[in-house]
Amino acid sequence: PSRAPRRASQHALAAMKSAFLGLVSVAVAQALASGVTPIQKVVQLLADFETKIIKEGEEGQKLYAAYSEWCEDRARQLTHEIKTGTAESESLKAAIAEEVATTTSLTAKIEDLAAAIATDEADLKAATHIREHERADFVKEEAELVETVDMLNRATSILEREMAKGGASMLQMRNVNNLADALKVMVQASAISNADASKLSAFVQTTQRAKEDASDAEEDAELGAPAAAAYKSQSGDIVEVLQGLTDKAEEQLGDLRKKETTDLHNFEMLKQSLEDELKFANKDLSEAKKGLSASGEAKATAQGDLEVTTKELKSDVEAKSELHQSCMTKAQDFEAETKSRSEELNALAAAKKAITEMTGGAAEINYGSAFLQVVAGRSTLASGVDLANFEAVRMV
């Protein structure tokens, strides 16, 4: 950088030398034509040249000041944009990270909710299936018990009616030892049908097994194979047995219906609970899916904005670097131009001073064409100023 201004100064001096020689030639010609001495004309032209250089310097200074101010404003603007872009980039990166975390959380929540919903749906389906079977079993058992109670009531009614008549068929009742024999006698007497007798026998056996499971041996003896003492070989005892069976059947029917009511209530409670869980779980699942979609869109938007911001930030950084180089180059050029003008002005001032000192009062003499034959008394040139002095004096 130190060599460039020096070369520029040398070029400027060479240009000034050429211009100065032309100036002197023009001055001599104008002086001969106007009657003014060549020395006066040269001094006047040197002053004009000096004024022109000063004016150019002032204009250059104004232009450079404006350019320097623009450099500062532009640098300040780019610095602000870089700062803003950096902050925005960090904010977008944080937003993206937050959306990634949200997406991960919502994805896990959706998986958990989906699993819970599947479990509740399976439980509800299984519970409904069990309830359907329970209901079917209840309907079947209820119908059987209702029919049994009806048969027992009819059998008891028939037996009591026949006993009241004192028919011959009822005389066989005195010889029966158990309920099974009593049912046979009633069938033979057409008091009940074979089918009814079979169903009643089945009911008695079922009741007996239930009591055996409960370890109630004493009551079992009465229902399974009642001893003669239990019946006392009297038909009245058979009526009591039938009434006891009726009471037992009605008790079982009542228990069955109570159990059905309880089972239905429990099912309805379980169903309501599962349906509520499914309702809220599906609502949460829907909201989680919407949140996941919104998070994905927000993440995509932030990524797009980050890409744009990153490009703009890179462009601003590059622009600032280029601006710095451009402004530095302009400053160096201006410094070189300023130095060159200073050297030109110094050379012009030295030339004017040399002409004045070396010509003395000769400025009043009109030499005409002989003016060009004056020879300077110096033979050694040490600088641009010496060159200007020599040229001025030589031409004079």
Image (spheres, grey):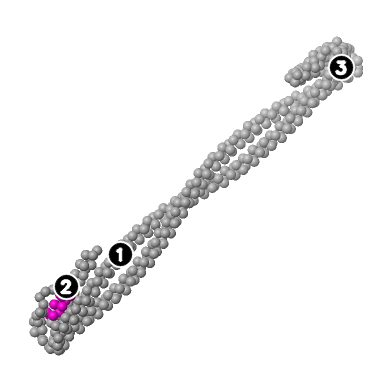
* Residue type beneath disc 2: Ser
Q: Residue at x 78, y 17 (%)?
A: 217
Residue 54, image quadrant: bottom left
Rendered view: 274 above or below 349: above
Rendered view: 384 above or below 278: below
Question: Is mark 3 in CB contact (under 8 Å) with mark 1?
Answer: no
- Residue for badge 3: 237
Q: Is residue 297 visible?
A: no
- Residue for badge 2: 383
Near mark 3 (Cα within 10 A), the count class, few <14, some 14-19 or many ≥20, is some
- State whether the magenta stretch is mostly helix, strand or loop: helix
- How many numbered discs sit on the rendered protein? 3
Q: Looking at the rendered structure, which numbered label has been put on residue 328?
A: 1
* Residue type beneath disc 1: Met
- Of labels 3 and 1, earlier in sequence is 3
Q: Which residues are magenta?
A: 383-395
Q: Nearer the viewer, mark 3 or mark 2?
A: 2
Outermost residue on the top side: it is 175
Q: Which element type, helix, strand or loop, lies under badge 2?
A: loop
Disc 2 from disc 1: Cα separation: 30 Å
Q: Residue at x 10, y 84 (%)?
A: 371
